Image (cartoon, rainbow, N blue to C red):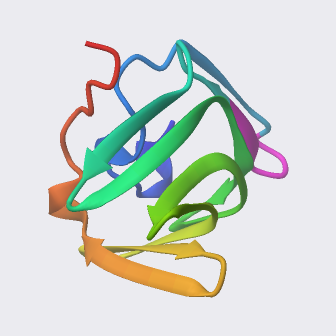
Amino acid sequence: MMAQYGFPAGILPAGVQGYTLNQDDGSFQVTLPGDCVVDIDGYRLQYRSQIYGNVRAGSIDGLDGVSVKIAIVWVGIHDVEVDGGDITFHAGAISKSSPTEGLVRDIDAYG
């Protein structure tokens, strides 16, 4: 589902059990086997078993269910944008861009 909106496959952990997508407004729900924590390019991300948001070409907003650990606190990632070969995550007042090539791999969070 995410690839049709320009996002790399590695934006979600491997093992997605299902998803719903409202084609009219872009709202979606993704179901994972359980909550998990993964390390990606020096960042610790936490995925809840249910992830919600609104997707359109090159952006996700209203994201709920994905957090990043900053120092000692977890901060929710609320928006994600893809532009060319870069992906930008917005968490609170912090934004971080990285090349998408670092994400294009399956994250095996349950193995």
Magenta span covers which residues?
A: 23-29
Q: Which residue is at a point 48% across and 20% down the rendered structure image?
A: 16
Q: Is residue 52 left or right of residue 69?
A: right
Does the segment drawn in magenta span residue 50? no
Vertical side of 78 occupied by 25: above or below: above
Residue 64 in view of the camera: yes
Residue 84 in view of the camera: no
Vertical side of 41 occupied by 109: above or below: above
Does the segment drawn in magenta span residue 27? yes
Q: Which residue is at a point 32% across and 51% down the rendered structure image?
A: 8
Q: Position of residue 79 (x, y in %)?
A: 62, 68
Q: Position of residue 108 (x, y in %)?
A: 26, 24
Vertical side of 12 occupied by 94: above or below: below
Closer to the camera, 50 or 54?
50
Q: Which residue is at a point 24% across and 74% down the rendered structure image?
A: 85
Q: Position of residue 44 (x, y in %)?
A: 36, 53
